[in-house]
């Protein structure tokens, strides 16, 4: 019998709503669906975080659907997304 590691549980947090996601790709797709359904522009879209089961921030999703490590305030010029929906 071999032990298998379970993938950590992640949640996409858009404002006060949370959606369980299995990957950064799914988080991006879910955010884009929520964004499109709301029909709001980027200035009216709430900060979107990806958090673990303890509520710790793993990353964030920008309005264009890209996923970045850490909080939006930690982003720096030259940083590459951890998931880029343009390359899919």
Image (cartoon, grey):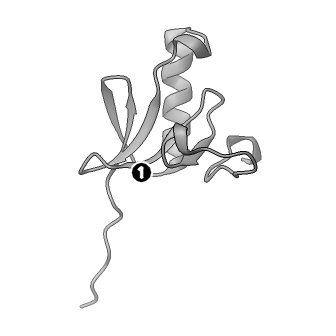
Where residue 58 appears, x then y in whole percent? Answer: 43, 51
Q: Nearer the viewer, residue 12 or 46?
A: 46
Q: Toward which corner of the image does residue 17 lie, by quadrant?
A: top left
- Residue beneath disc 1: 22
Q: Toward which corner of the image does residue 67 lie, by quadrant?
A: top right
Q: Toward which corner of the image does residue 61 lie, by quadrant?
A: top right
Q: Is residue 55 above or below residue 29?
A: below
36 relative to 19 in the view: left or right: right
Q: Nearer the viewer, residue 88 or 65?
A: 65
Where residue 69 appears, x then y in whole percent? Answer: 54, 51
Q: Residue at image x 51%, y 13%? A: 37
Q: Is residue 26 above or below residue 43?
A: below
Where residue 19 appears, x then y in whole percent? Answer: 34, 35
Give the class, few, some or many, for how many residues have Cα within 10 Å of label 1's Cα (few <14, many ≥20): few
Q: Nearer the viewer, residue 9 or 73?
A: 73
Q: Residue at image x 70%, y 52%? A: 80
Q: Residue at image x 47%, y 51%? A: 23
How many numbered markers are drawn?
1
58 relative to 78 in the view: left or right: left
Q: Residue at image x 61%, y 44%? A: 75
């Amino acid at each position: 019998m071999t032990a298998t590691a379970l993938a950590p549980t992640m949640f996409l947090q858009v404002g006060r709503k949370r959606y369980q996601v299995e990957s950064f790709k799914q988080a991006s797709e879910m955010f884009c669906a929520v964004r499109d359904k709301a029909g709001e522009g980027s200035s009216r879209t709430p900060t979107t975080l990806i958090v673990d089961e303890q509520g710790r921030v793993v990353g964030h999703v920008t309005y264009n659907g890209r996923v970045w490590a850490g909080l939006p305030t930690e982003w720096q010029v030259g940083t590459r997304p951890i998931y880029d929906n343009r390359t899919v």
